[in-house]
Protein backbone atom coordinates (compact mmCIF):
# COMPACT_ATOMS: atom_id res chain seq x y z
CA UNK A 1 0.00 0.00 0.00
CA UNK A 2 1.64 3.27 -1.10
CA UNK A 3 1.61 6.41 1.02
CA UNK A 4 -0.84 8.33 -1.17
CA UNK A 5 -3.42 5.56 -1.04
CA UNK A 6 -2.98 5.25 2.72
CA UNK A 7 -3.68 8.98 3.08
CA UNK A 8 -6.77 8.56 0.93
CA UNK A 9 -7.98 5.92 3.37
CA UNK A 10 -7.35 8.28 6.29
CA UNK A 11 -9.48 10.95 4.59
CA UNK A 12 -12.27 8.43 4.01
CA UNK A 13 -12.04 7.28 7.63
CA UNK A 14 -12.30 10.88 8.86
CA UNK A 15 -15.43 11.35 6.75
CA UNK A 16 -16.91 8.12 8.13
CA UNK A 17 -16.22 9.31 11.68
CA UNK A 18 -18.00 12.59 10.93
CA UNK A 19 -21.07 10.63 9.83
CA UNK A 20 -20.89 8.42 12.94
CA UNK A 21 -20.72 11.47 15.21
CA UNK A 22 -23.65 13.09 13.40
CA UNK A 23 -25.71 9.92 13.87
CA UNK A 24 -24.85 9.42 17.55
CA UNK A 25 -25.11 13.05 18.65
CA UNK A 26 -28.14 13.60 16.44
CA UNK A 27 -30.05 10.70 17.97
CA UNK A 28 -29.21 11.96 21.45
CA UNK A 29 -30.43 15.49 20.65
CA UNK A 30 -33.59 14.25 18.99
CA UNK A 31 -34.42 11.85 21.81
CA UNK A 32 -33.84 14.44 24.53
CA UNK A 33 -34.86 17.77 22.96
CA UNK A 34 -36.91 16.77 19.87
CA UNK A 35 -35.62 19.80 17.98
CA UNK A 36 -33.92 18.19 14.98
CA UNK A 37 -37.25 17.31 13.35
CA UNK A 38 -35.85 14.21 11.61
CA UNK A 39 -36.36 10.58 12.63
CA UNK A 40 -32.88 9.30 11.77
CA UNK A 41 -30.43 12.20 12.01
CA UNK A 42 -28.68 13.54 10.14
CA UNK A 43 -30.96 12.23 7.35
CA UNK A 44 -34.66 12.79 6.95
CA UNK A 45 -35.36 9.06 7.09
CA UNK A 46 -36.73 6.23 9.18
CA UNK A 47 -34.89 3.05 10.14
CA UNK A 48 -36.68 0.30 8.23
CA UNK A 49 -34.60 -2.49 6.65
CA UNK A 50 -36.37 -3.63 3.50
CA UNK A 51 -35.97 -4.90 -0.03
CA UNK A 52 -38.07 -4.28 -3.09
CA UNK A 53 -38.52 -4.75 -6.84
CA UNK A 54 -35.41 -2.70 -7.57
CA UNK A 55 -33.04 -4.56 -5.24
CA UNK A 56 -31.56 -7.05 -7.67
CA UNK A 57 -31.52 -4.53 -10.51
CA UNK A 58 -29.57 -2.08 -8.33
CA UNK A 59 -27.06 -4.75 -7.36
CA UNK A 60 -26.69 -5.73 -11.02
CA UNK A 61 -26.10 -2.13 -12.13
CA UNK A 62 -23.59 -1.57 -9.33
CA UNK A 63 -21.72 -4.79 -10.10
CA UNK A 64 -21.56 -3.99 -13.82
CA UNK A 65 -20.23 -0.47 -13.28
CA UNK A 66 -17.65 -1.62 -10.73
CA UNK A 67 -16.43 -4.46 -12.94
CA UNK A 68 -16.51 -2.77 -16.34
CA UNK A 69 -16.97 0.96 -15.73
CA UNK A 70 -13.33 2.12 -15.64
CA UNK A 71 -12.30 0.07 -18.68
CA UNK A 72 -15.39 1.04 -20.69
CA UNK A 73 -14.92 4.70 -19.83
CA UNK A 74 -11.38 4.51 -21.18
CA UNK A 75 -12.27 2.70 -24.44
CA UNK A 76 -15.65 3.98 -25.60
CA UNK A 77 -15.84 6.79 -28.16
CA UNK A 78 -16.62 10.05 -26.40
CA UNK A 79 -20.22 10.32 -27.59
CA UNK A 80 -20.74 6.67 -26.85
CA UNK A 81 -19.44 7.24 -23.33
CA UNK A 82 -21.89 10.08 -22.76
CA UNK A 83 -24.81 7.93 -23.95
CA UNK A 84 -23.67 4.99 -21.81
CA UNK A 85 -23.19 7.24 -18.77
CA UNK A 86 -26.72 8.64 -19.10
CA UNK A 87 -28.25 5.18 -19.57
CA UNK A 88 -26.32 3.69 -16.63
CA UNK A 89 -27.09 6.67 -14.40
CA UNK A 90 -30.80 6.40 -15.25
CA UNK A 91 -30.77 2.67 -14.49
CA UNK A 92 -28.96 3.25 -11.17
CA UNK A 93 -31.33 6.02 -10.03
CA UNK A 94 -34.47 4.19 -11.10
CA UNK A 95 -33.46 0.82 -9.64
CA UNK A 96 -32.69 2.44 -6.27
CA UNK A 97 -36.04 4.25 -6.34
CA UNK A 98 -37.83 0.98 -7.06
CA UNK A 99 -36.38 -0.60 -3.93
CA UNK A 100 -39.25 1.28 -2.24
CA UNK A 101 -41.71 0.08 -4.91
CA UNK A 102 -43.31 1.97 -7.79
CA UNK A 103 -45.85 3.92 -5.74
CA UNK A 104 -43.66 5.09 -2.89
CA UNK A 105 -40.39 5.18 -4.80
CA UNK A 106 -41.52 6.87 -8.01
CA UNK A 107 -45.20 7.74 -8.50
CA UNK A 108 -45.99 8.96 -4.99
CA UNK A 109 -42.96 11.10 -4.19
CA UNK A 110 -44.21 14.29 -5.82
CA UNK A 111 -47.83 13.93 -4.72
CA UNK A 112 -47.39 14.21 -0.95
CA UNK A 113 -48.83 17.15 0.96
CA UNK A 114 -45.53 19.09 0.71
CA UNK A 115 -45.02 18.67 -3.03
CA UNK A 116 -45.69 20.43 -6.32
CA UNK A 117 -48.41 18.23 -7.82
CA UNK A 118 -50.76 19.16 -4.99
CA UNK A 119 -51.31 22.63 -6.50
CA UNK A 120 -51.38 21.98 -10.24
CA UNK A 121 -55.10 22.78 -10.29
CA UNK A 122 -54.45 26.24 -8.85
CA UNK A 123 -52.50 27.25 -11.97
CA UNK A 124 -55.47 27.31 -14.36
CA UNK A 125 -54.76 31.01 -14.95
CA UNK A 126 -50.97 31.10 -14.92
CA UNK A 127 -50.47 34.92 -15.19
CA UNK A 128 -52.96 35.57 -12.38
CA UNK A 129 -51.34 32.89 -10.19
CA UNK A 130 -47.89 34.38 -10.73
CA UNK A 131 -49.13 37.85 -9.77
CA UNK A 132 -50.71 36.38 -6.64
CA UNK A 133 -47.92 33.93 -5.81
CA UNK A 134 -46.26 35.87 -2.98
CA UNK A 135 -49.59 36.33 -1.17
CA UNK A 136 -49.66 32.64 -0.25
CA UNK A 137 -46.10 32.03 0.98
CA UNK A 138 -46.45 32.74 4.70
CA UNK A 139 -48.09 30.12 6.90
CA UNK A 140 -50.72 32.56 8.11
CA UNK A 141 -51.77 33.61 4.62
CA UNK A 142 -55.01 32.28 3.10
CA UNK A 143 -54.58 29.05 1.13
CA UNK A 144 -50.85 29.09 1.82
CA UNK A 145 -48.71 27.05 -0.54
CA UNK A 146 -47.36 23.63 0.51
CA UNK A 147 -43.80 23.70 1.82
CA UNK A 148 -41.99 22.96 -1.43
CA UNK A 149 -44.14 25.27 -3.54
CA UNK A 150 -43.65 28.13 -1.08
CA UNK A 151 -39.96 27.31 -0.76
CA UNK A 152 -39.17 27.67 -4.48
CA UNK A 153 -39.79 30.24 -7.20
CA UNK A 154 -42.75 29.35 -9.42
CA UNK A 155 -40.73 27.91 -12.33
CA UNK A 156 -40.42 24.72 -10.27
CA UNK A 157 -44.19 24.25 -10.00
CA UNK A 158 -44.78 25.48 -13.54
CA UNK A 159 -42.69 22.60 -14.85
CA UNK A 160 -45.18 20.11 -13.48
CA UNK A 161 -48.11 22.25 -14.59
CA UNK A 162 -46.75 22.12 -18.16
CA UNK A 163 -46.30 18.35 -17.91
CA UNK A 164 -49.92 18.10 -16.82
CA UNK A 165 -51.06 20.31 -19.72
CA UNK A 166 -49.07 18.13 -22.13
CA UNK A 167 -51.07 15.10 -20.99
CA UNK A 168 -48.31 13.65 -18.76
CA UNK A 169 -50.43 13.78 -15.64
CA UNK A 170 -49.82 12.32 -12.22
CA UNK A 171 -46.92 11.33 -10.04
CA UNK A 172 -45.66 8.58 -12.33
CA UNK A 173 -44.91 10.88 -15.24
CA UNK A 174 -43.54 13.58 -12.93
CA UNK A 175 -41.26 11.05 -11.25
CA UNK A 176 -39.98 9.68 -14.55
CA UNK A 177 -39.35 13.25 -15.73
CA UNK A 178 -37.16 13.92 -12.68
CA UNK A 179 -35.26 10.65 -13.13
CA UNK A 180 -34.60 10.91 -16.87
CA UNK A 181 -33.75 14.61 -16.84
CA UNK A 182 -31.84 14.35 -13.56
CA UNK A 183 -29.65 11.58 -14.97
CA UNK A 184 -28.44 13.96 -17.68
CA UNK A 185 -26.65 15.95 -14.98
CA UNK A 186 -23.98 13.25 -15.09
CA UNK A 187 -23.49 13.95 -18.81
CA UNK A 188 -23.35 17.72 -18.27
CA UNK A 189 -20.63 17.41 -15.64
CA UNK A 190 -18.60 15.17 -17.95
CA UNK A 191 -18.94 17.69 -20.78
CA UNK A 192 -17.74 20.50 -18.52
CA UNK A 193 -14.82 18.53 -17.08
CA UNK A 194 -13.66 17.51 -20.56
CA UNK A 195 -13.81 21.11 -21.80
CA UNK A 196 -11.97 22.56 -18.82
CA UNK A 197 -9.66 19.81 -17.56
CA UNK A 198 -9.24 17.39 -20.43
CA UNK A 199 -10.85 14.21 -21.67
CA UNK A 200 -8.69 11.93 -19.59
CA UNK A 201 -10.00 13.41 -16.32
CA UNK A 202 -13.57 13.26 -17.56
CA UNK A 203 -13.21 9.59 -18.51
CA UNK A 204 -11.77 8.75 -15.10
CA UNK A 205 -14.59 10.59 -13.36
CA UNK A 206 -17.38 9.00 -15.43
CA UNK A 207 -17.94 5.77 -13.41
CA UNK A 208 -18.04 7.77 -10.18
CA UNK A 209 -20.63 10.17 -11.56
CA UNK A 210 -22.75 7.22 -12.66
CA UNK A 211 -22.51 5.28 -9.41
CA UNK A 212 -22.92 8.24 -7.08
CA UNK A 213 -24.71 7.62 -3.76
CA UNK A 214 -26.61 10.80 -4.61
CA UNK A 215 -28.80 8.58 -6.79
CA UNK A 216 -30.66 7.54 -3.63
CA UNK A 217 -32.18 11.04 -3.49
CA UNK A 218 -32.31 11.72 -7.23
CA UNK A 219 -35.15 9.24 -7.67
CA UNK A 220 -37.53 10.87 -7.61
CA UNK A 221 -36.81 14.33 -6.23
CA UNK A 222 -37.48 17.55 -8.12
CA UNK A 223 -34.03 18.61 -6.95
CA UNK A 224 -32.58 16.08 -9.40
CA UNK A 225 -34.26 18.02 -12.20
CA UNK A 226 -32.96 21.30 -10.73
CA UNK A 227 -29.47 19.82 -10.54
CA UNK A 228 -29.59 18.88 -14.23
CA UNK A 229 -30.64 22.37 -15.33
CA UNK A 230 -27.86 23.93 -13.24
CA UNK A 231 -25.32 21.40 -14.51
CA UNK A 232 -26.16 22.10 -18.15
CA UNK A 233 -25.88 25.85 -17.50
CA UNK A 234 -22.32 25.30 -16.27
CA UNK A 235 -21.50 22.80 -19.05
CA UNK A 236 -22.64 25.17 -21.80
CA UNK A 237 -20.61 27.97 -20.23
CA UNK A 238 -17.58 25.68 -20.24
CA UNK A 239 -18.14 25.01 -23.95
CA UNK A 240 -18.45 28.76 -24.55
CA UNK A 241 -15.14 29.65 -22.86
CA UNK A 242 -13.28 26.84 -24.63
CA UNK A 243 -15.04 26.80 -28.01
CA UNK A 244 -18.00 28.56 -29.63
CA UNK A 245 -19.06 31.75 -27.86
CA UNK A 246 -22.67 31.22 -28.97
CA UNK A 247 -23.09 28.60 -26.23
CA UNK A 248 -22.93 31.49 -23.73
CA UNK A 249 -26.46 32.64 -24.62
CA UNK A 250 -27.93 29.19 -23.93
CA UNK A 251 -25.89 29.00 -20.73
CA UNK A 252 -27.24 32.33 -19.53
CA UNK A 253 -30.79 31.23 -20.31
CA UNK A 254 -30.35 28.11 -18.15
CA UNK A 255 -28.65 30.06 -15.35
CA UNK A 256 -31.67 32.37 -15.30
CA UNK A 257 -34.04 29.41 -15.22
CA UNK A 258 -31.97 27.84 -12.43
CA UNK A 259 -32.52 30.88 -10.22
CA UNK A 260 -36.28 30.60 -10.79
CA UNK A 261 -36.31 26.91 -9.91
CA UNK A 262 -34.67 27.32 -6.51
CA UNK A 263 -33.53 30.38 -4.55
CA UNK A 264 -30.52 28.53 -3.15
CA UNK A 265 -29.23 27.70 -6.63
CA UNK A 266 -27.99 31.26 -6.99
CA UNK A 267 -24.91 29.75 -5.31
CA UNK A 268 -24.17 27.86 -8.53
CA UNK A 269 -22.61 31.21 -9.41
CA UNK A 270 -19.51 29.96 -7.56
CA UNK A 271 -19.09 27.20 -10.13
CA UNK A 272 -19.93 29.52 -13.00
CA UNK A 273 -17.34 32.03 -11.76
CA UNK A 274 -14.72 29.27 -11.66
CA UNK A 275 -15.52 28.40 -15.29
CA UNK A 276 -15.13 32.04 -16.32
CA UNK A 277 -11.85 32.27 -14.41
CA UNK A 278 -10.50 29.12 -16.05
CA UNK A 279 -11.45 30.54 -19.46
CA UNK A 280 -10.45 34.10 -18.64
CA UNK A 281 -8.08 34.49 -21.60
CA UNK A 282 -10.85 33.69 -24.06
CA UNK A 283 -13.32 35.87 -22.16
CA UNK A 284 -10.89 38.81 -22.44
CA UNK A 285 -10.33 38.15 -26.15
CA UNK A 286 -14.04 37.79 -26.93
CA UNK A 287 -16.14 40.26 -24.93
CA UNK A 288 -19.13 39.17 -27.05
CA UNK A 289 -19.18 36.02 -24.90
CA UNK A 290 -20.08 38.02 -21.79
CA UNK A 291 -22.68 40.02 -23.72
CA UNK A 292 -24.36 36.80 -24.89
CA UNK A 293 -24.19 35.32 -21.38
CA UNK A 294 -25.81 38.38 -19.80
CA UNK A 295 -28.43 38.60 -22.55
CA UNK A 296 -29.41 34.98 -22.00
CA UNK A 297 -29.36 35.45 -18.26
CA UNK A 298 -31.88 38.27 -18.47
CA UNK A 299 -34.58 36.35 -20.36
CA UNK A 300 -36.22 34.29 -17.59
CA UNK A 301 -36.06 36.97 -14.85
CA UNK A 302 -37.52 39.53 -17.26
CA UNK A 303 -40.35 37.21 -18.27
CA UNK A 304 -41.34 36.40 -14.68
CA UNK A 305 -41.04 40.02 -13.58
CA UNK A 306 -43.27 41.21 -16.43
CA UNK A 307 -45.73 38.45 -15.47
CA UNK A 308 -45.95 39.98 -11.99
CA UNK A 309 -43.70 37.74 -9.88
CA UNK A 310 -41.26 39.58 -7.59
CA UNK A 311 -38.29 37.26 -6.88
CA UNK A 312 -36.81 39.42 -4.12
CA UNK A 313 -40.10 39.88 -2.29
CA UNK A 314 -40.80 36.15 -2.54
CA UNK A 315 -37.39 35.32 -1.11
CA UNK A 316 -37.90 37.76 1.78
CA UNK A 317 -41.20 36.08 2.60
CA UNK A 318 -39.63 32.64 2.25
CA UNK A 319 -37.07 33.48 4.94
CA UNK A 320 -39.96 34.32 7.26
CA UNK A 321 -41.83 31.13 6.27
CA UNK A 322 -38.68 29.08 6.90
CA UNK A 323 -38.43 30.45 10.44
CA UNK A 324 -42.13 29.81 11.02
CA UNK A 325 -41.65 26.10 10.37
CA UNK A 326 -39.04 23.48 11.25
CA UNK A 327 -36.22 25.80 10.20
CA UNK A 328 -36.96 28.01 13.17
CA UNK A 329 -36.68 25.08 15.58
CA UNK A 330 -33.74 23.09 14.25
CA UNK A 331 -30.50 24.06 16.07
CA UNK A 332 -27.89 25.74 13.89
CA UNK A 333 -25.11 24.48 16.18
CA UNK A 334 -25.78 20.87 15.20
CA UNK A 335 -26.75 21.24 11.55
CA UNK A 336 -23.86 23.50 10.61
CA UNK A 337 -21.55 20.48 10.81
CA UNK A 338 -24.07 17.61 10.52
CA UNK A 339 -25.05 18.95 7.08
CA UNK A 340 -21.50 18.07 6.02
CA UNK A 341 -22.09 14.51 7.22
CA UNK A 342 -25.12 14.44 4.91
CA UNK A 343 -22.83 15.59 2.12
CA UNK A 344 -20.55 12.61 2.83
CA UNK A 345 -23.51 10.25 2.52
CA UNK A 346 -24.53 11.88 -0.77
CA UNK A 347 -21.09 11.94 -2.38
CA UNK A 348 -19.48 8.90 -0.73
CA UNK A 349 -16.17 8.10 0.90
CA UNK A 350 -14.40 8.15 -2.48
CA UNK A 351 -15.19 11.85 -2.75
CA UNK A 352 -13.67 12.47 0.68
CA UNK A 353 -10.46 10.85 -0.58
CA UNK A 354 -10.70 12.79 -3.83
CA UNK A 355 -11.07 16.08 -1.97
CA UNK A 356 -7.83 15.33 -0.16
CA UNK A 357 -6.12 15.01 -3.53
CA UNK A 358 -7.87 18.15 -4.71
CA UNK A 359 -6.21 20.08 -1.90
CA UNK A 360 -2.83 18.61 -2.84
CA UNK A 361 -3.37 19.55 -6.50
CA UNK A 362 -4.26 23.13 -5.58
CA UNK A 363 -1.26 23.45 -3.31
CA UNK A 364 1.05 21.96 -5.92
CA UNK A 365 -0.41 24.13 -8.67
CA UNK A 366 0.03 27.27 -6.58
CA UNK A 367 3.62 26.51 -5.72
CA UNK A 368 4.55 25.57 -9.26
CA UNK A 369 2.18 27.85 -11.14
CA UNK A 370 4.95 29.46 -13.22
CA UNK A 371 6.45 26.11 -14.12
CA UNK A 372 3.23 24.45 -15.28
CA UNK A 373 3.13 24.42 -19.10
CA UNK A 374 0.12 25.87 -20.87
CA UNK A 375 -0.20 22.95 -23.24
CA UNK A 376 0.47 19.31 -22.65
CA UNK A 377 0.30 16.25 -24.82
CA UNK A 378 -2.83 14.23 -24.23
CA UNK A 379 -2.04 11.34 -21.84
CA UNK A 380 -2.75 7.78 -22.85
CA UNK A 381 -6.14 6.52 -21.69
CA UNK A 382 -4.45 3.73 -19.78
CA UNK A 383 -1.87 5.99 -18.13
CA UNK A 384 -1.41 5.84 -14.36
CA UNK A 385 -3.35 8.73 -12.70
CA UNK A 386 -1.49 11.58 -11.07
CA UNK A 387 -0.29 10.48 -7.65
CA UNK A 388 0.46 13.84 -6.07
CA UNK A 389 4.13 14.30 -6.97
CA UNK A 390 3.69 16.90 -9.72
CA UNK A 391 0.13 17.85 -10.65
CA UNK A 392 -0.43 18.57 -14.30
CA UNK A 393 -2.14 21.74 -15.49
CA UNK A 394 -5.35 19.77 -16.09
CA UNK A 395 -5.29 18.44 -12.51
CA UNK A 396 -5.08 21.98 -11.15
CA UNK A 397 -7.93 23.15 -13.38
CA UNK A 398 -10.11 20.28 -12.18
CA UNK A 399 -9.23 21.16 -8.61
CA UNK A 400 -10.38 24.76 -9.16
CA UNK A 401 -13.76 23.54 -10.47
CA UNK A 402 -14.27 21.15 -7.55
CA UNK A 403 -13.19 23.78 -5.02
CA UNK A 404 -15.76 26.22 -6.39
CA UNK A 405 -18.49 23.65 -5.75
CA UNK A 406 -17.13 23.11 -2.24
CA UNK A 407 -17.32 26.87 -1.61
CA UNK A 408 -20.97 26.82 -2.72
CA UNK A 409 -21.64 24.05 -0.19
CA UNK A 410 -19.90 26.01 2.58
CA UNK A 411 -21.86 29.16 1.74
CA UNK A 412 -25.15 27.26 1.77
CA UNK A 413 -24.19 25.65 5.06
CA UNK A 414 -23.22 28.86 6.83
CA UNK A 415 -26.34 30.67 5.60
CA UNK A 416 -28.52 28.75 8.07
CA UNK A 417 -31.15 28.28 5.35
CA UNK A 418 -30.20 24.62 4.87
CA UNK A 419 -30.68 23.09 8.29
CA UNK A 420 -31.37 19.41 7.53
CA UNK A 421 -32.60 17.77 4.33
CA UNK A 422 -29.40 18.78 2.57
CA UNK A 423 -29.11 15.26 1.16
CA UNK A 424 -31.72 16.52 -1.30
CA UNK A 425 -31.21 20.29 -1.31
CA UNK A 426 -27.47 20.13 -2.06
CA UNK A 427 -27.69 17.71 -4.98
CA UNK A 428 -26.88 20.46 -7.52
CA UNK A 429 -23.62 21.21 -5.68
CA UNK A 430 -22.74 17.64 -4.71
CA UNK A 431 -22.54 16.51 -8.34
CA UNK A 432 -19.65 18.91 -8.92
CA UNK A 433 -17.66 17.40 -6.05
CA UNK A 434 -17.71 13.92 -7.61
CA UNK A 435 -15.20 14.66 -10.45
CA UNK A 436 -12.42 14.81 -7.85
CA UNK A 437 -12.62 11.01 -7.83
CA UNK A 438 -10.72 11.18 -11.14
CA UNK A 439 -7.57 11.65 -9.05
CA UNK A 440 -7.93 8.31 -7.28
CA UNK A 441 -5.94 5.18 -7.91
CA UNK A 442 -7.61 1.75 -7.52
CA UNK A 443 -10.94 2.95 -8.94
CA UNK A 444 -12.72 -0.38 -8.50
CA UNK A 445 -12.06 -0.33 -4.77
CA UNK A 446 -13.55 3.13 -4.44
CA UNK A 447 -16.45 2.38 -6.76
CA UNK A 448 -17.29 -0.61 -4.61
CA UNK A 449 -17.32 1.64 -1.53
CA UNK A 450 -19.67 4.06 -3.31
CA UNK A 451 -22.07 1.32 -4.38
CA UNK A 452 -22.13 -0.37 -0.97
CA UNK A 453 -22.90 2.94 0.75
CA UNK A 454 -25.81 3.69 -1.59
CA UNK A 455 -27.24 0.19 -1.31
CA UNK A 456 -27.00 0.19 2.49
CA UNK A 457 -28.67 3.58 2.86
CA UNK A 458 -31.45 2.66 0.46
CA UNK A 459 -32.15 -0.76 2.00
CA UNK A 460 -31.75 0.07 5.68
CA UNK A 461 -33.55 3.42 5.70
CA UNK A 462 -36.85 4.61 4.34
CA UNK A 463 -35.77 8.01 3.08
CA UNK A 464 -38.12 10.97 3.27
CA UNK A 465 -37.31 12.23 -0.20
Image (cartoon, helix red, strand yellow):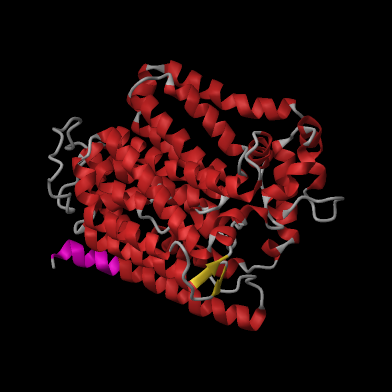
In the displayed structure image, the side of residue 192 where residue 149 appears, left or right: right
Name the quadrant of the N terminus: bottom left
In the displayed structure image, the side of residue 356 where residue 111 appears, left or right: right
* Image quadrant where residue 346 sits: bottom left
Residue 332 lies in the magenta-colored region: no
Q: Position of residue 43 (x, y in %)?
A: 53, 67
Residue 10 lies in the magenta-colored region: yes
For the point 43% across and 75% down, the residue is 20
Q: Position of residue 23 (x, y in %)?
A: 49, 75
- Closer to the camera, 363 or 50? 50
In the displayed structure image, the side of residue 133 where residue 8 appears, left or right: left
For the point 39% across and 17% down, the residue is 286
- Closer to the camera, 408 or 302? 302
Name the quadrant of the C terminus: bottom right
For the point 49% across and 22% down, the residue is 249
* Image quadrant where residue 185 sits: top left
- Closer to the camera, 168 or 261? 168
Q: Position of residue 411 (x, y in %)?
A: 52, 51
- Closer to the camera, 47 or 26? 47
Q: Position of residue 62 (x, y in %)?
A: 33, 59
Range of the magenta residues? 2-11
Amino acid sequence: MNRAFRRDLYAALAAALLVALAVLIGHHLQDTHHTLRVNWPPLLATWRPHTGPGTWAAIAVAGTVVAHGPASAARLPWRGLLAAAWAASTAWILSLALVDGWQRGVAGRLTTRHEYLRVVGRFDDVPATLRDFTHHILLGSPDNWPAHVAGHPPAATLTFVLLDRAGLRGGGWAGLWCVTVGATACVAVLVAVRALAGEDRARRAAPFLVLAPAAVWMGTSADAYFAAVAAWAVALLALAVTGRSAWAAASGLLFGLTCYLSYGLTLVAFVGAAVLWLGRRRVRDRPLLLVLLLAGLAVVPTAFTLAGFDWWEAYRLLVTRYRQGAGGVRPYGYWVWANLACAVLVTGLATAAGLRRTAVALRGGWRGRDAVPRQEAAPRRDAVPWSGAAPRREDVRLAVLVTAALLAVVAADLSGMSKAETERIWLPFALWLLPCCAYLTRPRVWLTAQAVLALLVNHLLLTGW
